[in-house]
Amino acid sequence: MRTGGGVDPGLCARCAHVQVVVSGRGSKFFRCLEHDRDPAWPKYPPLPVLRCGRFVAAEVSPPGGAG
């Protein structure tokens, strides 16, 4: 998955711990919410993230919702 700027975020694109922050100019930043739990963990990791010890795949809802 590529962002509007053409940068591939790697694992962050599919991680449950990501918060996508969009600036007023439209730039996208991938903030790791694990930083809130552990300040030593990077808040904005360098992209693309190819390996991450705290990666958790985000749950994806099936098209059309549950059921």
Image (cartoon, rainbow, N blue to C red):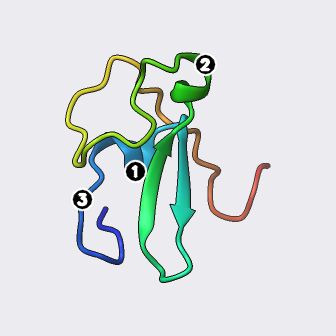
Q: Which residue is mark 1?
A: 13
Q: Quadrant of residue 42?
A: top left
Contact flag, marks 3 and 1 (Cβ < 8 Å): yes
The kind of residue on which mark 1 rests is: Ala
Residue wearing tag 3? 8
Q: Earlier in the sequence, mark 3 or mark 1?
A: 3
State the image coordinates of residue 20 (x, y, percent, origin top left): 53, 56
Q: Secondary structure at mark 1?
A: helix
Using a 10 Å C-alpha cutoff, classify the residue at mark 1 as few (fewer than 14 neighbours), some (14 to 19) or many (20 or more). many
Judge from the rendering whether residue 30 lies leftward or rightward of residue 7; answer left or right: right
- Residue 1's x, y, as percent? 31, 62
Residue at 22% over, 48% down: 48
Going by the image, does 8 lie left or right of 36?
A: left
Q: Nearer the viewer, residue 6 or 37?
A: 37
- Which of the pair 29/2 is nearer the observer? 29
Query: How far apart are the two marked residues, 2 and 3, measured between alpha carbons?
Result: 25 Å
- Disc 3 residue type (three-letter): Asp
Q: Residues within 10 Å of mark 3 (few under 14, many from 20)?
A: some
- State the residue position of label 2: 37
Picture quadrant where residue 21 is located: bottom right
Q: Is residue 16 above or below residue 53?
A: below
Where is residue 19? Give x, y as percent: 57, 48
